[in-house]
Amino acid sequence: MSAKQKKHLIRILISACFLILGLVVPYPVSAIVLLMTAYLLAGYDVLKEALSGILRGQVFDENFLMAIATIGALIIGEYAEAVAVMVLYQLGEWFQHYAVGKSRASISDLMQLCPDTATVLRDGELLEIDPYEVATGETLVVKAGEKIPLDGVILTGESSLDTAALTGESLPRDVQPGDQVISGCVNLTGVLHIRAEKEYVDSTVSRILEMVESAADRKSKAESFITRFARVYTPAVCIAALLLFLIPPLFFGGNWADWGHRALSFLVVSCPCALVISVPLSFFGGIGAASRNGILMKGSNELEALAQTYAVVMDKTGTLTKGVFQVSALHPEGISKEELVRMAASAEQHSTHPISRSICSFAGDLSALDEVAEIQETAGEGITCQYEGSLLAVGNARLLSKHGVIIPECVHTGTIVHVALDGMYKGHIVIADELKEGVADTLRSLRSHGVDQLVMLTGDNEANARDIAGQIGVDRVYAGLLPGDKVSRLEEVLAEKPEHKQVVFVGDGINDAPVLMRADVGVAMGGMGSDAAVEAADVVLMDDNPAKLITAIQISRKTLTIARQNIFFALLVKALVLILVTLGLAGMWLAVFADVGVSVLAILNAMRTLRYKLSDN
């Protein structure tokens, strides 16, 4: 609780004490003095805001309603009721600020991800500087217990990283030289030397803070409805209260004091605080709950849209698979497996292609490979070179067919790298991308959560795509797609969706950015995903785990349920009490409950989003 909140609560409690004393003191004059003191102490800021709003031309807000209702009650001699309305209204306001503070705290914890300084190795000296001053390529030194200030690659050192603040995962991640690390993680054990790959403004932490800070500006449909509703509703009820005060006495001989009391009670009941406060708070709490689970949402409209997910369209490489190509099978012809790998790696060591790197990584010590000459790499085909006086060809079927080499069938799926020496076939190496753990279970769970269509889009070949699709159980698979083709296929799914339903696309690469932007909700992998994908997405999964999409859908549905509960509850109670007040069957005290009581209950209900747990759904 902040110091400001404590002062506010103390003022409310002191006002309540004066109210109680005013009710029990037997002397009328003393009672009035105590009650007026309580009223001014509790409500001076409300009266000040109401007057300020009138002077600015912004008359019809909750401060104006509370001011006119309580001043009217004082005029007709209902001192205790006027004070009670103001004290309870302020109590409701305190609950509101406390709840908002709690939800902001759950998100502002992310601000602690960024260290104040970064240790950089410059000219053999360790310097502590502002993270903004670190240039790409510089070497960062991160000791045990310190946060990683910028995204980079480990040069030396081994350690375990605490990624909980970013991904929501409690298990540490082991890292070693060559591994990529992201800013905001805590180094738990050894000293790490890290080459900075991005400037601070482009780092993971900076992107997180920017998205969180802008999230409040992206209103959901429910929030926008409440904002528009309040603008029309407030002047409407003021006019209705005025008519309630004037028409019965003027035309039906009603008592002015009685109908004035009813009109004032009508104003107190009609204050839209419960709606205006609790609905945005519900969505703000949902965004905070998502962030604690390693899911960043760029706004409450995305949170709301996820609750209506009809289809999930997914990229393959890096989204469903690890995006790391590995040797899965060796099929030599007339030579040993070791000779096949050495031949292929001797040629591939001169290429930067991911397939080439995977073969070289499998081969191990590159210094032990044979020297080659006259290297020629053909994009989309492979490499030819001179190897021990012979022509070595390493690549796909298209490359070897140019050299007249007959290629046998392979039962394995994956990318197949063929090897031929002087036109003689020497075998092939199968390179496969490995599925992420639990992907099939994730897709089954998505179906159980009401997702009707699961579609996979990939630039990979048909055979590989069909093999992966068969393992995980998607409804449709489209292979061999360029970025523009992916958008076209997504358009087909969008055209099929029912009204008020949403299509979600999940991807991670630069080539996924157009599809992420076209989808109703674009979800990007934030850990290893490209900057373009993260920028284009509406939702970011910080640990690259597709299962977090289920968590995001659960949070969105729980948040939307709570927001709808608040809307229905507030409108129902207010409508009933307004009818009772108009008929003279309810007085100011019930009006106070209908306003402040409903607001407090709605706020407490909205705060449930802050305590979201997976077991809730």
Image: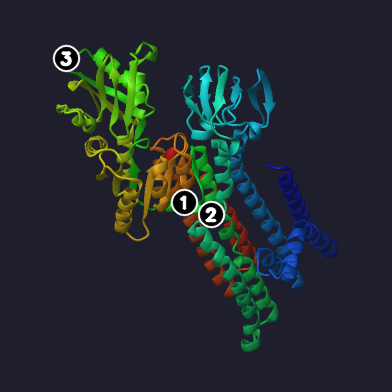
Q: Residue at x 32, y 53 (%)?
A: 488
In the image, is residue 420 above or below residue 602?
A: above
- Residue at label 2? 218
Packing grade of label 2 (10 A; few <14, some 14-19, many >=20) is some
In the image, is residue 58 above or below residue 498?
A: below
Frontmost residue, 258 versus 194: 194
Packing grade of label 1 (10 A; few <14, some 14-19, many >=20) is many
Q: Is residue 396 left or right of residue 43?
A: left
| Residue 377 percent location from the top left of the image | 33, 29
Residues under labels 2 and 1: Cα distance?
8 Å
Question: Element at badge 1?
Answer: helix
Residues under labels 2 and 3: Cα distance?
64 Å
Viewer can see residue 460: yes
- Residue at label 3? 334
- Residue at label 1? 302
Specify the farthest residue to the top. Answer: 368
Frontmost residue, 317 versus 363: 363
Q: Could you tell me the amino acid type at mark 1? A: Glu
In the image, is residue 530 above or below residue 163?
A: below
Q: Residue at x 23, y 39 (%)?
A: 462
